[in-house]
Amino acid sequence: MAKDVHLFAAAMADVKRLGAARRRLPPPEPAAPPPPKSPARPRPAPAVERDLSADNRTFDRDIDRGLSRGKVSPDAKLDLHGLTLAAAERAVARFVEDASARDCRVVLIVTGKGLREEAGRLVGGRIRAECVGWLNRPENRARVRGVRPAHLRHGGSGAFYVLLRRRSSAKMRSLRAAPQR
């Protein structure tokens, strides 16, 4: 606390009061040297997931190859055409939650390219620009493993493939009926 008072006083040293005498603070006390650190084993850094981005690095290679060759198709599709930004955000959150509950692996979110000309330059769509950010929100990030732009047959740059996480086997076992003996 005393250190804060002295820091504040140093920051305000050149400020002049209006009509009142200037108050002086006592000089700061010398700080005690920090106690020596004991040689402790360094802790491993917690595993932090990278934010999603619309590239192939966060996407499963086998599923990516299957989508490109047409051997794998999305399990569900969401079309955001005609929605406002707020409505699209809510729709994406509900869709990811529902698709995860249905144990879908790959889903398709169609945002549209949204290309238009403003002031003589080409501007992209707001929904498309915000979609990956919505998938990075904590409530969605727990369910989403990867995102990448869709293949031309599924909408090209106006759509995203979303790779969902698999539910844990413990959850799957608890949903199965118990065998009768």
Image (cartoon, rainbow, N blue to C red):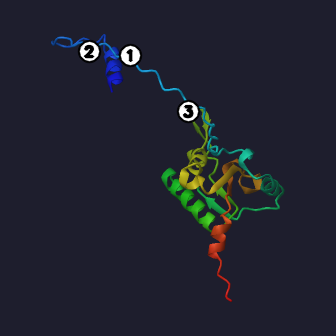
Q: Which mark is residue 119?
A: 3
Q: Disc 1 vs disc 3: which is toward the camera?
A: 1
Q: Which mark is residue 148?
A: none
Residue at 48% over, 52% down = 86
Front-lying residue, 95 or 16: 16
Q: How many marks?
A: 3
Label 1 close to label 3 by CB (< 8 Å)? no
Dividing the image into 4 quarters, which one contains the C terminus?
Answer: bottom right
Dividing the image into 4 quarters, which one contains the N terminus?
Answer: top left
Q: Is residue 73 above or below residue 177?
A: above
> Furthest residue to the bottom?
181
Looking at numbered disc 3 in the image, what kind of residue is underneath it?
Ala
Disc 1 secondary structure class: loop
Answer with mark 1 or mark 3, whichever residue precedes in sequence.
1
**How dense is the environment of label 3, judged by Cα within 10 Å: few (below 14), some, or many (20 and up)?**
few
Disc 3 secondary structure class: loop
Q: Could you say where residue 122 lies in the image, as x and y percent from the top left?
A: 62, 36
Looking at numbered disc 2 in the image, what kind of residue is underneath it?
Leu
Please name the residue that numbered disc 2 is placed on. 25
Q: Which mark is residue 30?
A: 1
Answer with mark 2 or mark 1, whichever residue precedes in sequence.
2
